[in-house]
Image (cartoon, rainbow, N blue to C red):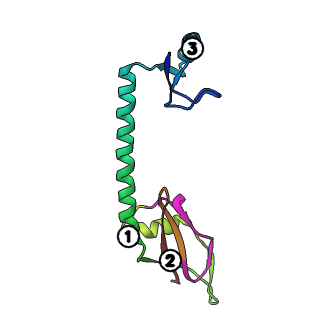
Amino acid sequence: MKVLLLEDVKNVGKKGEVIEAKDGYAKNFLIKEKVGVEATSEVLKQVAEKKAKIAKHEAKAEAEAKVLFEEIKSKKIIVKVKASENGKIFGAVTHKEISDEVKKQLKYDIDKKKIEIDPIKHLGIYKAELKLYKGIKAELKIEVIAL
């Protein structure tokens, strides 16, 4: 019997896979425990449509990330902070502050979790890596100046 798995099942298969299982195992465990459904042509058609929809969405997101990469790679943001006379910042420039400044200055909404940079504790120019999509990373220049 062909069964579409609704969850990962150890030593059987992963969620979304169609497997061939013995009738007793399929009916008495997989279907009864609601970890799988019988893979009828209607169910397989719905799965194929769902996968096509996800693939279309992924392609659109990747295209948007590539456009954003081209726009960001030559840009720079300026972060104004309180600092001592010798250039040491009171506190540090956080990922959230960088995200807010990108939103304010460049009009792009970048999640703070997608910004990779070491803590900034002195005035100067730094480079942050923005994870825009799977495998697409843009480098953003950040200039930290005193108020």
Q: What stretch is highlighted in magenta?
A: 110-126
- Residue 12 lies in quadrant: top right
* Kind of residue at badge 3: Lys
Of residues 103 and 85, which is closer to you in this image? Answer: 103
For disc 1, the neighbor class at 10 Å (few under 14, some 14 to 19, many from 20) is few
Of residues 6 and 11, which is closer to you in this image? Answer: 11
First of labels 3, 2 by sequence position: 3
- Contact between marks 3 and 2 (CB within 8 A): the answer is no
Q: Is 122 a magenta residue?
A: yes
* Kind of residue at badge 2: Ile
- Contact between marks 1 and 2 (CB within 8 A): the answer is no
Q: Distance between the residues labelled 1 and 2?
A: 17 Å
The residue that mark 3 highlights is: 22
Q: Distance between the residues labelled 3 and 2?
A: 60 Å
**Disc assigned to residue 70:** 1
Q: Where is residue 87 in the image (x, y as percent from the top left)?
A: 62, 86
Q: Please tell me whether mark 1 or mark 2 is closer to you in this view.
A: 1
First of labels 1, 2 by sequence position: 1
Q: Position of residue 107 (x, y in %)?
A: 36, 67
* Kind of residue at badge 1: Glu
Q: Please tell me whether mark 3 or mark 1 is closer to you in this view.
A: 3
Q: In this view, does 36 lie to the left or right of 62?
A: right
Q: How far apart are marks 3 and 1 (CA)?
A: 53 Å
Q: What element carries label 3?
A: loop
- Residue 76 lies in quadrant: bottom left
The residue that mark 2 highlights is: 142
Of residues 87 and 19, which is closer to you in this image? Answer: 19
Q: Position of residue 110 (x, y in %)?
A: 45, 61
